Image: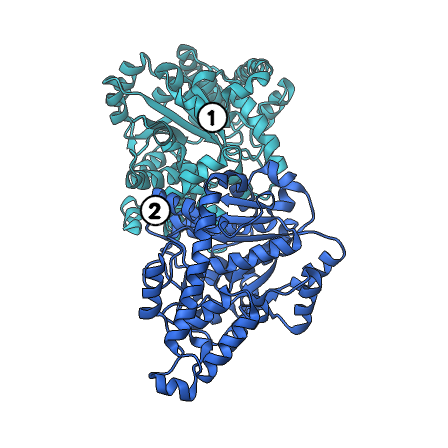
Chain colours: A blue, B cyan
Amino acid sequence: MQSKFIETLGYADVAQEKQITPWEVQGELTDTDYQKVAREFGAKIIDPELTEMIRSAAGEVHPYITNGTFFAHRDLDMLLSDYRSGKRFYLYTGRGPSGKMHLGHLIPFIFTKWLQDRFGADLLIQITDDEKFLFRDLEMEDIRKYTEENILDILSLGFRPENTHIIVDSEQAGILYNQAIRVARHINVSLARDVFGFSDSDNVGKFFFTSMQAVPAFLIPALTGRDERCLIPYAIDQDPHFLVARDVLPKIGYRKPSSIISKFMPALKGSGKMSSSDPNSGIYLDDDPKTVRKKMMKYAFSGGRATAEEQRKFGAVPEIDFAYNIYKLLEPDQGKVRKVYEEYRRGALLSGEMKQIATDKINEFLEELRARREEVRSEVDAYRFSIDKVMR
Amino acid sequence: MQSKFIETLGYADVAQEKQITPWEVQGELTDTDYQKVAREFGAKIIDPELTEMIRSAAGEVHPYITNGTFFAHRDLDMLLSDYRSGKRFYLYTGRGPSGKMHLGHLIPFIFTKWLQDRFGADLLIQITDDEKFLFRDLEMEDIRKYTEENILDILSLGFRPENTHIIVDSEQAGILYNQAIRVARHINVSLARDVFGFSDSDNVGKFFFTSMQAVPAFLIPALTGRDERCLIPYAIDQDPHFLVARDVLPKIGYRKPSSIISKFMPALKGSGKMSSSDPNSGIYLDDDPKTVRKKMMKYAFSGGRATAEEQRKFGAVPEIDFAYNIYKLLEPDQGKVRKVYEEYRRGALLSGEMKQIATDKINEFLEELRARREEVRSEVDAYRFSIDKVMR
């Protein structure tokens, strides 16, 4: 039955073809690819009707939805319709602390913060230090260092302490493991292998880990008894984890989590995800303005033409241009974004100018972030998960 | 390399032939079988030299060693020689709380208590409620009930509270999981499948579990930094778990645990282990004197002859007689045991008389146990594991 589940979703095939697993992404996806992958995974594309439902519930629609960054979902319509009839839901997202954070890592958190603010929702942020220990050749002390730094980075965005619950797996391992074995009973080795592409030489912790990652998707109901749905914003490469969670949770008495799914974040060099292993593959949150400028000028993949002359004549392809794409994600004023798009598209802006605009935006964003980062440093404990805090 | 480890020990073959896994034992083993299995698993038989080493260190030798109940070991000689030069060791044993306890379950604890008393050793008792949840069709609330009852049963034997640390996996899941992932990194799915006979349709929690069971074998050094060896008394069917532990622990900076290995406990009906699933397969600790008598008379496998006349003429085979075997384990006076053996062997005792002697001994033992059980009920917390307590 479980292998039928996989067949039905065509998961294994697509994952193989596109090499999408939660740990590795290769090749570049077009919009059509994204839609195909989402459909084959059994997710739905966010259509204008659902967009209007979001607007009506949230009072506005975040640009990441209108510009297609978050483009697919599972059961978001059901969650919103419950919300309209007065039922609360909570949010769950996470971070694997295997290195310093890039801009790309932070984008989904910007969106999550919007969801928290608009819906007054509790937010669980799972920091999967155990995952990184099991999957990477890293020692726990390094992972711990990244954990503390990454938490500061995330909190710099301004989450609400009273509604935000940071779960560091190693700190809450007891609560998580006790719930995870309930999930693990329903995941066999075949399933884990098929979904995640593991082999028999992979360690048993990797096979078990998806159970740990499933826990926050039912932790609030499990601990509090409150019948709250869970909404998980994530990039599409994390979908396998939550497909498994959706399969298992009803078997142990909980609702399937809803999800809102993003494309991969723009990559500085134009392809793949930003990678922690290549320092020039993305812009770190602690890159100083000069470094940001240098990376942008030297590495940022451009959708502009080879020469200024050609650019003036034919215009750029903003869709594949890192500078434009990151600007689009960091500039809240959609009027400005549209203007830049049109000018760049028709060649009124040169590639270097586009990079300049984006560089300024990035540096402005990072500067604000770093200022708030110092403020939040002494307040981290207020954001940590505890049973007492979620019971309130 | 890991599959070579298995090959070297010939583990998979023997396990297959004898169907010995930690969860299932079939067929009856002769003394020769035991020795063969132990040797093929890479364990050593306890010889007279080692027995003298034990006597010299402990001041006496427990009858379970002289009568061959505990018959094999790994690195016990090294541990004793360290002990003689002033180095402490600690003990680790456990119980899977999937049902009420039989007499047979308690025997290894009697021996462990002797070790604790004689060597003044700390003792970790792991109660693997998570294992039972992952391996059996039991719900957590049932397992919790058995956990509390089983702990009382074990403590009734009179362990020292200051040196005894009961670790209920679900209560200490955080500490255990954080250590278990260090083990899990070194156990791949192939190894777990080969050693335990799992299949791909087994759940991922089963594959992970052996990592949890390995933790107490290095928990004292891991938490306290004290360089103490660990001695694990167990029945031979648990050997696979600790073979894996011995393979992995040096890779994460700890010593291989030593072990002292017993045969299976005598089975009321004469074959296999006593089983929790058949109420008449063994004598429960809460069986009243009348029930014990009935079970002994009706079910106890006899090594006596078919008729009183034949018995008087040919004598019994005490080695395969449940009544004799359990009497041997419960009667501390070895002079009495030898006398009974000889009389029964040559036919001076009839089968019914042997059963009567054993029944009286069992009832005497159970009565004392139940009296202490009530005394210990209010003191259970004094025996629970805590980091503070092991640090002392």
Q: Return the x and y of residue A41 as percentages of the image width and height.
A: 55, 68
Question: If you read the primary sequence from the N terminus, does the residue marked by circle 2 or circle 1 appear first?
Answer: 2
Q: Chain of mark 1?
A: B
Instruction: Check disc 1 and give the amino acid type.
Output: Ser
Which residue is drawn at the image coordinates 44% and 31% (left, top)? Answer: B264
Where residue A81 appears, as percent x and y from the top left, is 72, 61
Q: Give the tally of numbered discs.
A: 2
* Picture coordinates of residue A166, whole percent (x, y): 52, 45
In the picture, the disc for residue B386 is: 1
Q: Residue furthest right?
A: A85
Q: Which mark is residue A48?
A: none
User: Which label is found at residue B186?
Assistant: 2
The kind of residue on which mark 2 rests is His
Q: Nearer the viewer, residue A143 or B317?
A: A143
Q: Residue at x 40, y 38 (%)?
A: B179
Q: CA distance from mark 2 to mark 1?
A: 27 Å
Q: Element at badge 2?
A: loop
Q: Is residue A320 above or below residue B309?
A: below
The answer to whether residue B104 is visible is yes
Residue nearest the viewer, comparing B211 with B137: B211
Q: Is residue B290 above or below residue B131?
A: above
